[in-house]
């Protein structure tokens, strides 16, 4: 029982520091980066804007990447974002899902799948990226899209679900 209470207290303290203090509008970018690194979020960029939520620390964000405000990193499994990416505001990275349960409770046992975003990608505002998705290098995902499947490198994807519109040079 004490171990469970200790775990809950540590989790609440972590959430308070990362998701309230570090993500505050008053926190300088370089200090925010250092706090994230101390708590195990591997970020090689200081360009993470305020009001982002990190559900865990199994996250890696590459050098030169910008993460705009209000992004949500639901983090049951690893999220890796490559170098020189632009992540617009309020993007949702969702790594968890559930097994299909019985008719009295359809959301069965939870499980997760990693998300990987390649180098040089541009993810538009309010995009949702679902578990297990790989977005290839140089992709553009249009605002409001729902990414349910892997995206080929150097391609434009739009829609819900996101579909390949064209290849990019």
Image: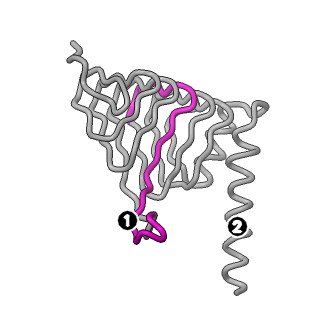
Q: Which mark is residue 9?
A: none
- Please, which residue is most extreme toward the bottom here? 1
Label disc, if present, on residue 99 of the rendered structure: 1
Front residue of this view, candidates 149 and 99: 99
The residue wearing badge 2 is: 10
- Judge depth for marks 1 and 2 and give the one in front: 1
Q: Is residue 5 above or below residue 22?
A: below
Q: Which residue, as the protein is rendered here, is positioned at the far front?
A: 103
Q: Quadrant of residue 31?
A: top right
For the residue pair 118 and 75, the one nearer the viewer reads as 75
**In this rendering, position of residue 144 left or right of residue 9:** left
Closest to the observer, 146 or 106: 106
- Residue most extreme to the right: 26
Which residues make up the magenta segment? Answer: 82-106
Q: Label the magenta part by its dominant secondary structure.
A: loop
On the image, the x and y values in percent for residue 122 come to 40, 23
**Which residue lies at the image location 31% right of the left edge and 24% below the top edge?**
157
Residue 118 image offset from top left, x and y in percent: 32, 34
Looking at the image, is 5 positioned above or below residue 155?
below
| x then y, percent, for residue 102 | 40, 71
Element under disc 1: strand
Estimate how packed mark 1 is, as few (under 14), some (14 to 19) or many (20 or more) residues with alpha carbons within 10 Å. Answer: few
In percent of the image, x 47 and y 42: which residue is there? 93
Which secondary structure, mark 2?
helix
- How packed mark 2 is, by other alpha carbons closer than 10 Å (few <14, some 14-19, many 20 or more), is few
Please report whichever mark, 1 or 2, sits nearer to the chain's N-terminal start.
Answer: 2
- Is residue 49 found inside the magenta-colored segment of the image? no
Q: Position of residue 126 (x, y in %)?
A: 52, 29
């Amino acid at each position: 029982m004490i171990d469970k209470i200790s775990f809950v207290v540590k989790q609440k303290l972590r959430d308070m520091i990362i998701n309230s203090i570090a993500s505050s509008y008053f926190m300088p970018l370089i200090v925010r980066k250092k706090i994230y690194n101390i708590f195990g979020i591997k970020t090689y960029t200081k360009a993470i804007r305020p009001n982002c939520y990190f559900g865990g620390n199994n996250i890696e964000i590459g050098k030169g990447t910008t993460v705009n405000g209000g992004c949500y990193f639901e983090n049951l499994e690893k999220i890796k974002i490559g170098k020189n990416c632009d992540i617009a505001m309020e993007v949702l990275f969702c790594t968890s899902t559930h097994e299909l349960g019985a008719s009295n409770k359809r959301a069965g046992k939870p499980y997760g799948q990693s998300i990987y975003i390649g180098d040089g990608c541009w993810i538009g505002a309010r995009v949702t990226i679902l578990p297990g998705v790989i977005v290839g290098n140089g992709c553009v995902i249009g605002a409001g899209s729902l990414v349910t499947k892997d995206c080929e490198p150097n391609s434009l994807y739009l829609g819900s679900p996101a579909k390949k519109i064209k290849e990019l040079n």
